[in-house]
Image (cartoon, grey):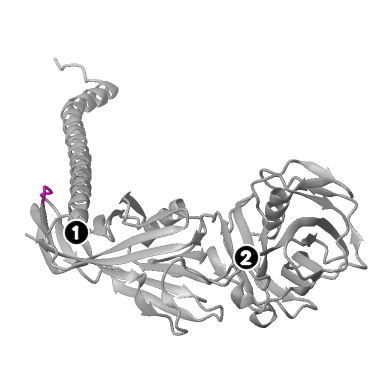
Amino acid sequence: MSRPRTPWLYRFVRDRQSQAEPLGVILVIGLVLVSTTVVVTFGFTAIEDVQSRSEIDRAENGMTLLDSRLSTVALGDSERQSVDLPTSNGGYTVDEDAGTIKIVHRNYDGSNDVELVSNTSLGAIVYRNENGDDAIAYQGGGVWRRYDDGSTRMVSPPEFHYREGSLTFPLVRIRGNGSAAGRTTVGASTTETSTSLYPRNETYPDGTEYRNPVENGTVAVTIWSEYAEAWGSYFETRTDGNVSYPAPNQVTVELISIGTLGDFQMPPETQGITVRGMDAGHSLDDFSFTIRPQDTEESSFSNLDWSFYAKQGQREFEIHVGGNGVNSCNEDVALSIYYSDDGGDTHHGWYSDDYLETECGEVNGKPADGDEIWVDVDLTPENSTDVTFQKVKNDNVHFKSGSKTLASDARFDSHSPDPNVTYSSGNTENLTLVTRHYFAQMGPDFDLVVADGNNAGIGESGSSGYIYYGGSGKVVTYLHITEHNVTATVG
C-alpha cells in the first residue's frame, strides 16, 4: 500500500525551515564580527585621539615650564637652565631661523623717511606630534600652539609689555640647531649680556639721537612666523595700535609717537609743536609757556602780538597773547582763545584782558634792571581763573576774526568731563576747562604752529614751554628694546 504523497506546500515550508537554521547562525556570526570590527576600529581611533591629545597637552605644559626657565636665562637671572620634557611621541627641534622680527621708525623726521631699528631672526624651540599636524613652540619669549587646521593661539604671552605709552620689548632670540624624538631634555644657556637697541648711542640720518621720548612718525613691529595670527591677537588685546596682516604668516602692529611731551624749546615762526595720540576726553594735564623778547630788544615787547594756532579741516584754533606798549613790569597782557568748526564763518571766543601780565627779574645772572622782561602763560592753572565768552577782537595773528560772527552759543557736552552747559555772550568759564575742551575738540593729532604778528621782537630761541597729556593705547612715548641671545640644546 503506497503512502500518501506529501503536499508540495508542506515540502516547500519544511525545506525553507531546514535551510534557515544554518543561515541564521551565519548571519548572527557575521553581525557579531562586523560589530566587533566597528567597535575595535572606532575604539582604537578614539584611543589614538585621546593619546595624541594627551601628548600635546603634556608638550604644552612642558613648554610653559620651559618658558619660565628660559626667561630667567634670557633676562640675566641665571646662566643655565634645563627642563625635562615628558612626551613619548613626536619630536623636538631647535631652529634658530624660525621667525623674523623687524622694527622700524617711520617718518621719524617728518619727511616720510624710515629708520630700521632692528631686523633679526627670532628662532624657536618646537614640538611636533608624530603626524606633524600639531605644534607647540617657544618663540619670542612666549609659547604658541598650532592646530592641524592651521589656526594658532597663544599659550603664554611673549616678552612684549605695553603700558600707558611705554613699550618694553626684550627680544629673546633662540640660537642653536638640533632635534630629538620622544622624551628629551632641553638646555638653555647664555654667555652674552643684553644689547640695547633703543635707546642707544647712535643717531638717525638727520643727526637726532636714538633717545626717549620718541617724537614724530610711527613705530611698526612686524613678525614673520607660522604663529603670526596668534601674535596678532595678542597685539590686539594689549594695544589699540593698528594691527594688520599684510601676508600669510605675517603681522604688523603700528603705534604712533606721542609727539611733543614735557619741556620744549619754542619753535621759530611757522614751525610748531606736535600733539599726537592724545587720549579722548580732557586728557591735557598741563600746558604753559614763557615768551621773551629778542636779545636785541630786551627793553620791552613793544607791540606784543603772538599766537599758537592749529587747523584741522574746518576746525580752527588759536591762542593769542597781545598788548600795545607793554614797556614795563606788571603790565596787563590780553589773552584770547578762538575756535571755529565751520571754517571761520562763526566762532567761539574767550577773552581776558588782565589774567596775564609782564614780569621782570634776574635772568641768567643778570640783575633786574628793567631790561629783563617776559610773560608767563599758564593755560591750565590750578586756581579758578575765568575767561569770558565774547567775540574775539581783530587781534588774532592767523585767524583774523574782526569781520566774523560770534556763535550764538557754545555748548560743552562732547567729552568727559564737559559740564553739559551752554554759554552765550558774557558768560564766564574756568580757563583750564576751556583749554582742555578745545584741545579735545582738535585732538587726537594736530600741530600748534607759532605765528608772530606785527611784533618782530619775540625771541623764540629764548622762549620755552611745557606740555603734558595722556596718550591713548595707540601711541608710544618710550621705547625700551633690548636683544637677548639664548643658546638652546635638545637631547
- In this orientation, which residue lies closer to the viewer: 429 or 125? 429
Above or below, 479 relative to 53: below
Rendering quarter of residue 344: bottom right
Q: Residue furthest top?
A: 1
Q: CA distance from mark 1 to mark 2?
A: 53 Å
Residue that appears at 79% across and 72% down: 397
Give the percent coordinates (x, y) of residue 5.
21, 20
Residue 260 visible in the displayed image: no
Residue 204 visible in the displayed image: yes
Q: Is residue 237 magenta?
A: no
Taking the image as shown, residue 8 lies to the left or right of residue 378, namely: left
Residue ID for mark 1: 76
User: Disc 2 on helix, strand or loop?
Assistant: loop
User: Disc 1 on helix, strand or loop?
Assistant: loop
Give the percent coordinates (x, y) of residue 315.
76, 64
Residue that appears at 53% across and 65% down: 263
Give the percent coordinates (x, y) of residue 341.
80, 61
Q: Looking at the figure, which quarter contains the C terminus?
A: bottom left
Taking the image as shown, residue 434 lies to the left or right of residue 477, namely: right
* Kind of residue indicated by mark 1: Gly
Boundaries of the magenta span: 83-88
Taking the image as shown, residue 348 lies to the left or right of residue 201, namely: right
- In this orientation, which residue lies closer to the viewer: 473 or 225? 473
Give the percent coordinates (x, y) of residue 83.
11, 51
* Kind of residue indicated by mark 2: Gly
- In this orientation, which residue lies closer to the viewer: 297 or 67? 297
Give the mark toward the camera: 1 or 2.
2
- In this orientation, which residue lies closer to the viewer: 12 or 134? 134
Residue ID for mark 2: 361
Taking the image as shown, residue 171 lies to the left or right of residue 274, namely: left
Above or below, 293 relative to 173: below
Which mark, residue 53? none
